[in-house]
Image (cartoon, rainbow, N blue to C red):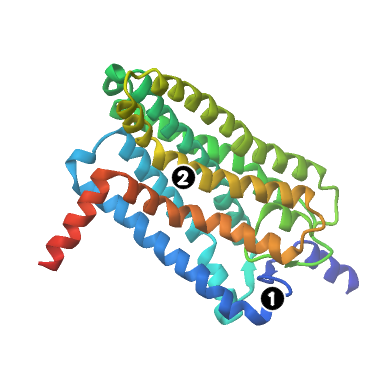
Amino acid sequence: MSDSNTTDFTNPSTFILLGVPGLEATHIWLSIPFCTMYIIAILGNFTILFIVKTEPSLHGPMYYFLCMLAVTDLVLCTSTVPKMMSIFWFNSREIDFNSCLTQMFFIHCFFAIESGIFIAMAFDRYVAICDPLRHSTTLRNPTVAKIGLAVVLRGSTLALPCPLLARQLPYCRTNIIPHTCCEHIAMVNLACADTRINNYYGLIVASSTICLDMVFIAVSYTQILRAIFSLPTKDARLKTFLTCGSHLIAILAFYIPGLFTILTYRFGHNVALHFHILFGNVCLLVPPMLNPIIFGVRTKQIRDRVLRLFTHKGT
């Protein structure tokens, strides 16, 4: 009987998500800002998709990449927030083993996809500013589609080994995950086996999707800034730089918290667990919430279309 119970527990059918350990009494209050951010993210990204679809003048490479970013943000936050809210509101902590692995894949896959889209947007800005005469021929619709497909394939390829490796591990210590979602390292730490491969691979994925992508973006913007500073007038330099402003703000909002989370999770052993979890969730929710606001406010074509939409409704 004892052996049978041990065998069953080694391959648990469900995991228990604790939410935010130590802050269980405040789960209802924590749900308010997270739910608010989620609602804003949903409304904002669907608005971006609707405006680009219905406005023919926005059917161009930059706006296609913006639509890819909106879809990615919708999937990224929806893969975590509904389960988080069920924990906070209904104390529904159980999650099926396969569902847990699926959630893990979606989190890491679409995080990598979002990073790849920022590289694509940086390339778009590089061509538009450094070689404007060839922009329309370089970034045609088939090319944009190929870039989008490459970004999705890269994200999927990088993320798929995480759940596959986690699936092979025996879980004989506990099936309780001290987190609001099935984050890779949080789940792997429950295993009663050597997890060095999982840890090393997780670090490689984090490095390739954050550090390496930041290098590519930095190289692109180095060339962009050189082209901007070579323009003859101050007004021309300012106008050209402002076309990159929304992209740069979105990049900072995505990479700085993401890099901080990775560093604290790997090396910040003295940081409280609830801070890790709360900040990790903020990193998954803040970029999807901010991106439509940033691009909507700073992109004149989108801003004007939104104003016309509400003006017509008001009249």
Q: Nearer the viewer, residue 79 or 255?
A: 255
Q: Are marks 2 and 1 in contact (CB under 8 Å)?
A: no
Q: Position of residue 133 (x, y in %)?
A: 27, 17
Q: Position of residue 282 (x, y in %)?
A: 57, 59
Question: Which one is in front in this view, the residue at disc 2 or the one at disc 1?
Answer: 2
| Res 12 seen here | no
Q: Residue at x 33, y 51 (%)?
A: 297
Q: Does residue 73 appear to the left or right of 58 in the view shown?
A: right
Q: Residues within 10 Å of mark 2 (few under 14, many from 20)?
A: some
Q: Position of residue 265 (x, y in %)?
A: 73, 52
Q: Amino acid at mark 1?
A: Leu
Q: Nearer the viewer, residue 158 or 288?
A: 288
Residue that lies at the very extreme toward the left in this rendered image: 315
Q: Which numbered tag is attached to residue 23? A: 1
Q: Amino acid at mark 2?
A: Ala
Q: Quadrant of residue 178?
A: bottom right
Q: Is residue 207 above or below residue 236?
A: below
Location of the C terminus (image quadrant)? bottom left
| Res 198 seen here | yes
Secondary-structure class at tag 2: helix
Location of the N terminus (image quadrant)? bottom right
Q: Nearer the viewer, residue 156 or 274?
A: 274
Q: Residue at x 72, y 58 (%)?
A: 187
Q: Can you identify the residue that label 2 sits on?
A: 250
Q: Residue at x 67, y 70 (%)?
A: 20
Q: Does residue 278 appear to the left or right of 42 in the view shown?
A: right
State which tag comes first along the sequence, 2 or 1. Answer: 1
Report the Cα–Cα distance between label 2 and label 1: 31 Å
Q: Is residue 7 above or below residue 60?
A: below
Q: Residue at x 85, y 48 (%)?
A: 194
Secondary-structure class at tag 1: loop
